[in-house]
Amino acid sequence: MSSGPSALTVHALRLGPGEELLSSLVAFVEERRLKAPFIITCVGSVTKATLRLANATADNINQVVHLNERFEIVSLVGTLNKEAHLHICLADKEGKTIGGHVLGDVEVFTTAEVIIGEASDLSFDREMDERTGFPELVITARAKRA
């Protein structure tokens, strides 16, 4: 599934100590009624995170890690529609990285500087895909305004 080119609107958000990353991003998107939002970039640090690892399947979603230490956010990518689909990569104090699907409980340590893009001519939604067992991205063109 793909789409043609779309205009881009850019939003910036800074989260502070103690704020939860995923729920804050979802609230930001809902408050602004963004229809096709995605992460452009993010830098910052966290004190904890809950991630689903790559080995998980629709039948075995138990490949989950609960991290409780200080990490630098070295990457955050994904779409932010109603059922956000985000992947994060975190580096510990020795520079070792871990990454996975963001399940939540990602608590900001000092800051999270997030740049969010919105494809102005598109809408993102999710539908269950029988092939994967997960709700997958559905891209549709928005009706043109007169």
Image (cartoon, rainbow, N blue to C red):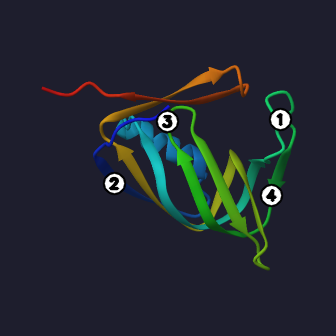
Label 2 to label 4, Cα distance in Å? Answer: 31 Å
Q: Is residue 61 above or below residue 52?
A: above
> For numbered disc 3, what is the local secondary structure?
loop
Mark 3 vs mark 4: give the one in front: 3
Residue at numbered disc 2: 10
What residue is rendered at 65% in x and 56% in y? 88
For the residues labelled 3 and 4, the Cα–Cα distance comes to 25 Å
Q: Which residue does the numbered mark 4 point to in the structure image?
A: 67
Q: Which badge, 2 or 3, is on the more N-terminal residue? A: 2
Compared with 29, 9 (above or below) is below
Q: Secondary structure at mark 1?
A: loop
Residue identified by numbered label 3: 81
The residue lying furthest to the left in this view is: 146
Q: Residue at point 64% right, 51% down?
A: 87
Between 103 and 107, the residue placed more toward the observer is 103
49 left or right of 138?
A: right
Q: Residue furthest bottom?
A: 94
In front of the other: 106 or 77: 77
Residue at numbered disc 1: 61
Query: Residue at 35% of width from left, 40% of height from top?
Result: 32
Q: Secondary structure at mark 2?
A: strand
Amino acid at dot 3? Asn
| Distance from Cα at disc 3 to Cα at disc 1 | 21 Å
